[in-house]
Each structure stands twice: as C-alpha cells, then as structure tokens.
C-alpha cells in the first residue's frame, strides 16, 4: 500500500511538468507555423488589398483581432505594427493548429497541411490541386525545415 501511495504522489507531482512540456511543444509548433505561413505568403503588389507579411484580408483581420485582442484593429495598424500582426496571427494559428492536432490524433504533418489549407481557403480540406496544393506544400516545407537542421 505504501508503494502504491508513493507512486500516486510521484505521478501527480509529474503531471504539471508533463502538461508544461506539452504546452511548450505547442508554443514551439505555433511559432514555427507562424513563420512558415509568413514565408509562404503569396507576394502581391503594394495595393493588393492584403496586409502585413502574412497577407491578411481586412475582413478577416476584423474578426481575428476581435477574437484575439477583444478589439478591432485597422488594416493600417496591422500593416504598420509587425509585433501586433504577429500577435494576432500567432493567436489564430494556435487556435487552428491546436484544433487540427486534436482532429488528426496529433499527426503533426496532417495538422500543418490542414491548417495551411484553412489559412488559404477557410476550409480544412480540398487543397490537393493547383495553387492551393502548391501553397500547402510550401508551408509544410518551411514548417519542416527547422526540424531538419536540428
């Protein structure tokens, strides 16, 4: 009985450490995904209607900033302030990537593909041809690149 009780105490003591490590892992995944989305963003003309290095539409920015910051951010603010843009993009990316990791039983590659597809189209599937397929492959390539160098 004494050993059982010791095992329970040790296990309960380790739970916060495991949760903390898992969260750090998600934070790292989000940071790498945010950078992959930035690097893969299609480049357009200066007045193409998309904002920041992540090429976000103004109507999308409204809902994202309300969700993440509890206030609307103007496209001009988003464009000028890269720290603000990264904060909003990171918030949304965390929400989506976390959801896709859960939906794919923690299949990181599938979750990244689905999140990249959603980023481009608003849908988690259907990015297997044409421009969207190329974009998803590009995001996945940037996402996996840091892992290959470690």
Image (tube, rainbow, N blue to C red):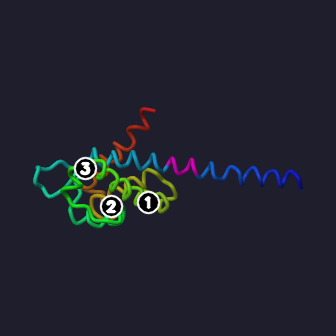
Distance from Cα at disc 2 to Cα at disc 3 = 24 Å
Q: Which residue is mark 3?
A: 81
Image quadrant where one finds the N terminus: bottom right
Counting residues from the N terminus, which is met first, the one under dot 3 or under dot 1? Answer: 3
Say whether marks 1 and 2 touch (CB < 8 Å). Answer: yes
Distance from Cα at disc 1 to Cα at disc 2 = 10 Å
Q: Callout 2: few (<14), some (14-19), or many (20+) C-alpha neighbours within 10 Å?
A: some
Res 100 label: 1
| Residue 114 visible in image | no
Q: Which residue is mark 2?
A: 118
Say whether marks 3 and 1 touch (CB < 8 Å). Answer: no
Q: Nearer the viewer, residue 105 or 23?
A: 23
Q: Secondary structure at mark 3?
A: loop
Distance from Cα at disc 3 to Cα at disc 1 = 28 Å
| Secondary structure mostly taken by the magenta-highlighted segment of the chain | helix
In magenta, the rendered stretch is 20-25
């Amino acid at each position: 009985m004494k050993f059982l009780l010791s095992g329970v105490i040790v296990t309960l003591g380790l739970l916060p450490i495991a949760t903390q490590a898992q969260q750090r892992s998600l934070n790292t995944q989000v940071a790498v995904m945010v950078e992959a989305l930035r690097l893969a963003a299609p480049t357009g003309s200066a007045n193409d209607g998309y904002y920041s290095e992540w090429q976000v539409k103004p109507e999308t920015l409204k809902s994202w900033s309300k969700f993440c910051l509890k206030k609307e951010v103007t496209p001009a603010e988003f464009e000028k302030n890269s720290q603000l843009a990264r904060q909003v993009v990171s918030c949304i990316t965390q929400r989506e990537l976390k959801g896709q990791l859960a939906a794919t039983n923690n299949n990181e590659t599938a979750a990244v593909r689905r999140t990249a597809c959603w980023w481009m189209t608003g849908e988690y599937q259907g990015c297997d041809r044409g421009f969207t397929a190329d974009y998803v492959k590009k995001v996945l390539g940037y996402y996996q690149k840091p892992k290959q160098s470690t």
